[in-house]
Image (tube, grey):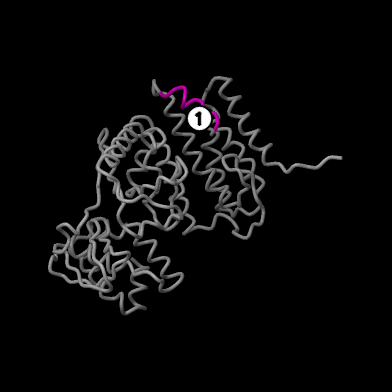
Amino acid sequence: MLVLKSLANTDDALAASAHLLGHAHHLDPAAANVLLDHPWLAVWAIDRVRHGATDRPDYLPFAALAAAALSGRSDTAVQVTPRAGLVPVPGLGVLRRRGGSTTVTPADLSGRRWTPTRWWRFTEQSVTLDLRVDDLDPYRDCFGLPVAARLSAAQAAELERSVGHAWHLLVGYAPTHAAEVAAGINTFVPLADGSERGHSVTHADAFGALAADANLGPVDLAVTMVHELQHSKLNAVLGLVRLHDPADPQRYFAPWRPDPRPIGGLLHGTYAFTAVAEVWAALRAHPELAAQATARFAVVRAQVERALVELARAGSLTSAGRLWADRLAERIGRLAAVPVPASADAAGRWEVAEAERARRPTIPTG
């Protein structure tokens, strides 16, 4: 809200939109807060503050249109500029409208030119995940990877089944992480088929959103949601607290990556994979997933234990960063006490050792 207010105070073209948004918040704070949490609004606003006007239409008028619709002001006219022939209405859908700047009212959001956003609700043991599947908004392309076009009805149905099963697994076996996902994830962006299989990603300014392969199975999807939420949480913390010196020139071994990582990347990966290890540890109790979960847990546990060694040698962590690493060490210490067969533990440690050997520079002989 402060960022939007700052933009409106310095740009007369945005002031009318900000006023509509503020009025909607006065009428219905809960509905307006859902809109203010919209990830593409945050990405646009922060980018606008950092870089000024860009070559694409401002997003705030689209948010104002959604605010008018949510507050029941169906006759409110909002001046918008379509992007790629689309007028996105955050959280609601997109309106196809060609040409330049045009006036749209909430009453226009119907008919054959209107495509609504898919919203799904999953409830397990009274724990609810409300998820927007965004395969419409042209501003969802902020992740640096190609995003999928509108999913077919069959594709959407399959994804809905996978998310539902993933939610069942998380609530049933990793309830603490499920509660976090319910509070912290609201938007799923399907990646295009050309993206790497199983790929997933977040954006530092788009809290609540993740982009991922829409063909992930339920188990991988459950782990992916937890994994990506950790990146969003840590990005939010980094916006408030300095955990490391960004000027650190050192590169650190990260067992899950083929390339050495800067300190920020190592911290992110260790934090995210600690949560992943906790989920795999929990899934060992599932009768049909026990073998897979045990093998994956052993590998990821070995990875985060090795990453702790790298964090310990990092001189660029601040006092807050060291506290963060200490808390991570406590969690990883609890994971170390989880019993697994000796063969699985050895296989996990061997995989990490092989990864480290592969990353060592080759020294010519002779």
Q: Quadrant of the N terminus?
A: bottom left
Instruction: Using residue 163 as the reference point, say whether residue 103 is left or right of it.
Output: left
Question: Looking at the image, is 130 positioned above or below residue 88?
Answer: above
Q: Nearer the viewer, residue 172 or 210?
A: 210
Could you tell me which residue is drawn at 55 percent across and 34 percent down? 333
Asked where in the image residue 287 lies, by quadrant, the reply is: top left
Could you tell me which residue is drawn at 46 percent across and 43 percent down? 199
Specify the amino acid type for callout 1: Arg
Asked where in the image residue 12 lies, by quadrant, the reply is: bottom left
Asked where in the image residue 172 lies, by quadrant, the reply is: top left
Q: Which residue in the structure is indicated by mark 1?
A: 296
Q: For mark 1, does the 10 Å Cα neighbourhood hold few (<14), some (14 to 19), or many (20 or more) residues?
A: some
Could you tell me which residue is drawn at 34 percent across and 35 percent down? 166
Residue 229 in magenta? no
Could you tell me which residue is drawn at 56 percent across and 23 percent down? 344
Farthest right residue?
Answer: 366
| Residue 352 in picture, x, y percent from top left | 62, 34
Instruction: Using residue 112 as the reference point, say whether residue 131 is left or right of it.
Output: right
| Residue 149 in picture, x, y percent from top left | 33, 51
| Residue 15 in picture, x, y percent from top left | 29, 76
Q: What secondary structure is marked by label 1? A: helix
Instruction: Using residue 244 as the reference point, say whether residue 7 is left or right of it.
Output: left
Q: Quadrant of the C terminus?
A: top right
Q: Main secondary structure of the magenta part?
A: helix
Instruction: Using residue 359 as the reference point, say whether residue 86 is left or right of it.
Output: left
Highlighted magenta segment, given as a residue range: 289-299
